Image (tube, rainbow, N blue to C red):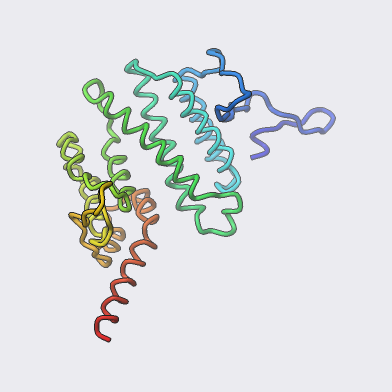
Amino acid sequence: MASQQVQHSNEGIRVPSEDRMVKRYRRPAAGYEEQLPSDIRPPLVLQKTLNYLIDEVLGGPDPLSKVHKFIWDRTRAIRNDFSIQQVTKLEDLRIAISCFERIARFHILSLHQLAGNSENSVDFDAYQEREQLNNTLLSLIYYYDDSRYRLVSPNESEFRAYCIIFEIQDQRSDLEDRAQNWPISILNDHRVQTALKLYAAAASASDPQGPLRPQAPHAIAQANVPYFFTIVRSPAVPYLMACAAEIYFNKVRRMALDTIWKAYKIKR
């Protein structure tokens, strides 16, 4: 990655390469001046920046573990610039959706490749990674809903499926109700249907749901551990969907051990 960011002067000193510099994320805080309008990159520039980050930096010779922190920060800055602008033009919305989709895929891949790997996870924080993925998906779903009758998003079903999987431990009990409000073409998409099967198989009836107390039992929980892993291994689950489901492998295994322990306890 150093070769992407520096160049050698005639004296043999490594100096920054201005044509490869990418705007970093700056957290809003007291003492910092507001960003000038000239500092906010328009959607087309943001798209070109992301192309560089994915194609040249991530796709370069350095491993993901080395470039991850740099890309993580710069993609956050890209999302922040989109958020400040509140894009509404049709072409700008199309660019924003495409960028957020690619950033979400980057976070899902990072969670699989770097989490739990001691050699690659020195500076990796799975909690922060998941937090930024959640923020990315939240904005993406907003873009989908906001542009529903203005443009067609060909990848919406893919990301709706990821959102379903990420609700496996969510205490909200209205997933099925919300899904019924999606366009029928998305609800019937094989990826969404596969994600709903994973969701039901991984959920336990003992998982409480709802904001009120006493909390209601899980409405569609199957607690079917073998079926969950059978689905994950099947051709119906693409690579990135399997990476998303992997986040809940330990949760599903704990559910299986808890079932065994309870059965043994009753027999005794």
- Residue 100 is situated, as x and y percent measured from the top left of the image, at 40, 32
- Pick the residue in front: 162 or 48: 162
Can you say which quadrant of the picture contains the N terminus?
Answer: top right
Residue 231 vertical position relative to residue 166 in the rendered view, above or below: below
Residue 236 vertical position relative to residue 40 in the rendered view, above or below: below
Q: Is residue 223 left or right of residue 130?
A: left
- Residue 154 is situated, as x and y percent measured from the top left of the image, at 27, 32
- Pick the residue in front: 184 or 216: 216
- Residue 220 is situated, as x and y percent measured from the top left of the image, at 18, 55
Q: Is residue 181 left or right of residue 107?
A: left
Residue 53 vertical position relative to residue 43 in the rendered view, above or below: below
- State the residue at coordinates (31%, 48%): 167
- State the residue at coordinates (26%, 23%): 151
- Residue 122 is situated, as x and y percent measured from the top left of the image, at 61, 53
- State the residue at coordinates (49%, 50%): 126
Q: Quadrant of residue 218?
A: bottom left
Can you say which quadrant of the picture contains the C terminus?
Answer: bottom left
List the single residue furthest toward the right.
11
Number of numbered markers? 0
List the single residue furthest toward the front.
213
Q: Is residue 229 left or right of residue 45?
A: left
- State the residue at coordinates (55%, 46%): 64
